[in-house]
Image (tube, rainbow, N blue to C red):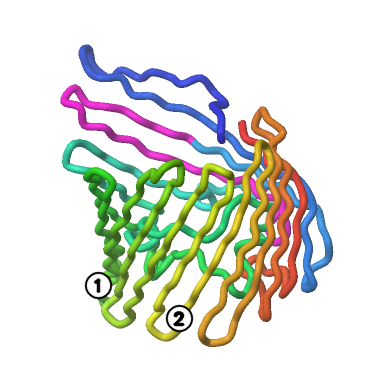
Amino acid sequence: MKKILLASTALVGFAGAAAAEVSLSGYAEMGIAGGDAVETQFWNEIDVTFTLSGETDGGLQFGATIDLDEVTNAGNVAGDFDARDGGPDSVFISGSFGKVTLGDTDGAYDWALTEVYMGTALADDHSTHAGSNGNSGLDGTYDGQVMRYEYSFGDFAAALSAELDDTGVNDAVIGLGFKWGADMGGTTVNVGLGYQTDGTTDIIGVSAHAALSSGLDLRLNYADLDVDEWMGLGIGYTSGALLVQANYGEYDSGADGFGLVVNYDLGGGAVVMAGYGSGNGPAGNGHGDDTFSLGLGLSF
């Protein structure tokens, strides 16, 4: 949805060399958020993303993303601007051999699985309740620098990833993922299988996703987390500018919760967003067992 904020700039290093492009996009949020553990408060967040891309004379593609956030919502100092506070910063190269990505990117487990959540909310209330799971697996066990190799063949794709312990003391986190997707008579179906291990903990997850031409969207996840098990379900509907979804998740250890989200696209990059989450434990956004938010998402 993000639109180009600044016209792409062609950068030519040498005569005859393929051109590289640099583009800038932006995203901002404004509204209110709260919960039973925090007072209702104003929320605003600004995000700027630089996207760099290029191609060699031989057809090798390369690129990078740099994400900068200026966050002024709860828990952040107003005007705190930090390149490391942003989203995924990564570099990639791709060609007939596949694609290699390095940086703040998904491991093969997360890459392969489809989350049960749709839409977006200011404080991610619908996707951070006590029963939620974002399929992050063991990503971030060490420094968060993940290298992922992926290759597609027909309707299938596979990936292998690694995250190293820079101290050399612990085993690397190794991930393996497979996914398949196809259009079956107007219904888009996707299935994913992911595995990750750090030499001590082994996790495996599967996901299934069906998007019907009627606008109905069905999502199912299951994960064996070695010391726990998790199951999640999402049911959504999209009609024109309106998106609504409800989801539920539970852990075998007893934590569970549900989330609700409503988005309405006003056009031009503006979306009205409402989110709610409730569980039998604190939400991952720090706003308590029951959390909510309402506002606008603005893409530039």
User: Between residues 107 and 77, which one lies in front from this camera angle?
Assistant: 107
Q: Depth check: 226 or 51 in front?
A: 226
Give percent across and percent down for residue 11.
35, 20
Residue 238 visible in the shown view: yes
Q: Earlier in the sequence, mark 1 or mark 2?
A: 1
State which quarter of the image contains the C terminus.
top right
Residue under the point 67% across and 37% down: 241
Residue 229 is labelled as: 2
Front position among marks 1 and 2: 2
At 29% across and 65% down in the image, what residue appears?
175
- Identified at 42% across, 40% down, the residue is 65
Return the residue found at the far front.
185
The stretch of residues the image draws in magenta is 50-79
> In this picture, is 239 found above or below 167?
above
Secondary structure of residue under mark 1: loop
Q: Residue beneath label 1, please?
A: 168
The kind of residue tagged 2 is Glu
Q: Dividing the image into 4 quarters, which one contains the N terminus?
A: top right
User: Is 6 rendered above or below residue 130?
Assistant: above
